[in-house]
Image: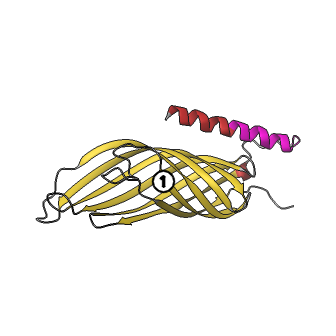
Amino acid sequence: MKKILVILSLVAINANVFAQSRNDDEPRFLKKENVFVGGSIALGYTGGTNTSSFVIGANPEIGYTFSEFIDLGFAFNTIFNSYKFYDAPYRFKQDAFNYGAGIFTRIHVIPNFFIQAQPEYNWIVYKQSNLDNGTTYPKITTKASSFLAGIGYGQRIVGQSSFFTLLMFDLASERFSPYRDTYGTAVPIIRGGFNIYLNTKKKK
């Protein structure tokens, strides 16, 4: 996790240098109109003969546009996961509620498309119940890190707003990641959202 944070910090520094080199008379670092706020809704589902899973959550974020190619920011999450298993000695259901935070980098490679990397740290509460007799087991509280990566599509106008759809997978392999089922399989995460820039420029 520390290595990831260092890499993303270096990306931010390089992005700032690149932005300033484009217009030396107008420093780009921490311009208010380059700050954006917003977020997305997370949704995921997998189904099969032996198991099924459902994921839904909200992901508020705040970020900064360093150049027309790179955004960097902080993301927060509140996610609910529900899994059902049918191939165990008994049928059971596992629900998980988690909250967490992380940082993200978006690289706009070509118009309307971008790639995103997002390391996170999460706190999770698990609850299991027997679907055959209704027995509920004691809750388990734990924590885990994750590293989400994927590709997005949308419209982005720096200084105004952006709308996007994003598909990501957890590239880490921690057992209690909220983006993996009990078998360790990564659950596809689909997010759709928007951002609004804090444009402080006043018309004369």
Q: Quadrant of residue 83?
A: bottom left
The residue sitting at 47% across, 47% down in the picture is 171
Q: Which quadrant is home to the C terminus?
A: bottom right
Q: Is residue 14 found inside the magenta-colored segment of the image?
A: yes
Determine whether, in the image, residue 192 is placed left or right of residue 78.
Answer: right
Q: Which residues are magenta?
A: 13-25
Q: Is residue 49 found inside the magenta-colored segment of the image?
A: no
- Residue that mark 1 sits on: 169
Q: Quadrant of residue 4?
A: top right
Q: Quadrant of residue 202?
A: bottom right
For the rendered model, the colour scheme is secondary structure
Q: Nearer the viewer, residue 60 or 67?
A: 67
**What percent of the width, then of the height, locates residue 6?**
58, 33
**What percent of the width, then of the height, locates residue 141?**
28, 45
**What percent of the width, then of the height, locates residue 7?**
60, 35
Instruction: Relative to 22, say whether 186 is above or below.
Output: below
Q: Nearer the viewer, residue 125 or 196?
A: 125
Determine whether, in the image, residue 133 is placed left or right of residue 105.
Answer: left
**What percent of the width, then of the height, locates residue 101?**
47, 46
Q: Amino acid at mark 1?
A: Phe
Q: Main secondary structure of the magenta part?
A: helix
The residue sitting at 70% across, 53% down in the picture is 109
Determine whether, in the image, residue 107 is placed left or right of residue 25.
Answer: left
Secondary element type, mark 1: strand
Near mark 1 (Cα within 10 A), the count class, few <14, some 14-19 or many ≥20, is some
